[in-house]
Amino acid sequence: MEAFVSLTALQSFLFYMATALVLTIIYVVVYIWVTPHPEFKLNLLPTYFEGDPDTGMLNDAFVRKPLLSRQGANIEIVQGSRPETVNDGPYGGEGYIIQAFNPLPEFDGNYLLVGCWLVASKGVGMCIREDRTLITGKDARFIPHVILN
């Protein structure tokens, strides 16, 4: 834990940028989902590559996301076999994943998302993002937190 506390601002920024880049490549989630280690799946929604026959297990409600995307761009929420919510953007040429749909909670017309960063199964940081739509986008409000000790 001391390693995180002693990082300089530049080191923290570079670490954040590197992890943000890796996490924007959503197909990492597919590989985690299909791994034979059930402990890796505890906090993930079922996720498959588009066209995988297992996507049929997701019923009529799912989210279609580009393999490479940022800030909610090119994401579609599909319910009843038709897109219900769509965010346009420049991504998607690389392909898509299909993920189970789990709607975010709504508070006063805003949708809340809580994210957590784990290192060696211990919480080291979290964030709260809030947006006016179910797809959290570039205009979402963001509140970061660090967990010390």
Image (cartoon, grey):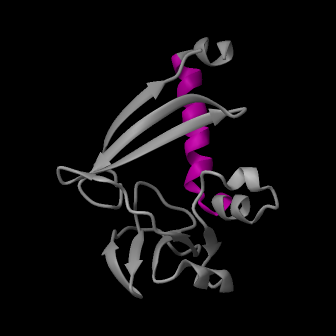
Q: Nearer the viewer, residue 10 or 139?
A: 139
77, 121: nearer the viewer: 121
Name the residue at the left extreme.
108
Left or right: 40 with respect to 116?
Answer: right
Quarter where residue 32 is shown: bottom right
Magenta segment main secondary structure:
helix
Q: Quadrant of the N terminus?
A: top right
Q: Which residues are magenta?
A: 9-28
Give x and y (percent) for residue 75.
42, 68
Q: Is residue 36 above or below residue 99?
A: above
**Residue 86 falls left or right of residue 81:** left
Residue 138 position in % (x across, y down)? 33, 51
Quarter of the image where one finds residue 2:
top right
Which quarter of the picture shows residue 14? top right
Q: Is residue 43 above or below residue 122?
A: below
How many discs mark residues in the rendered view?
Answer: 0
Q: Is residue 35 above or below residue 142?
A: below
Viewer-side residue, 127 vs 88: 127
Position of the C terminus, as image quadrant, is: top right
11 part of magenta stretch: yes
Name the residue located 67 percent from the left edge and 16 percent from the top edge.
3
Name the residue rendered at 40%, 78% in the picture. Answer: 78
102 horizontally vs 53: left or right: left
| Residue at left offset 34%, top offset 70% | 88
Q: Position of residue 56 (x, y in %)?
A: 59, 85
Q: Relative to residue 123, is residue 31 depicted above or below?
A: below
> Residue 93: percent from the left, percent from the top?
54, 75
Residue 122 magenta-highlighted = no
Instruction: Please report the residue visible at 33 percent of the width from the left and 54 percent of the height from the top.
Output: 105
Give the side of residue 136 with respect to residue 61, left or right. left
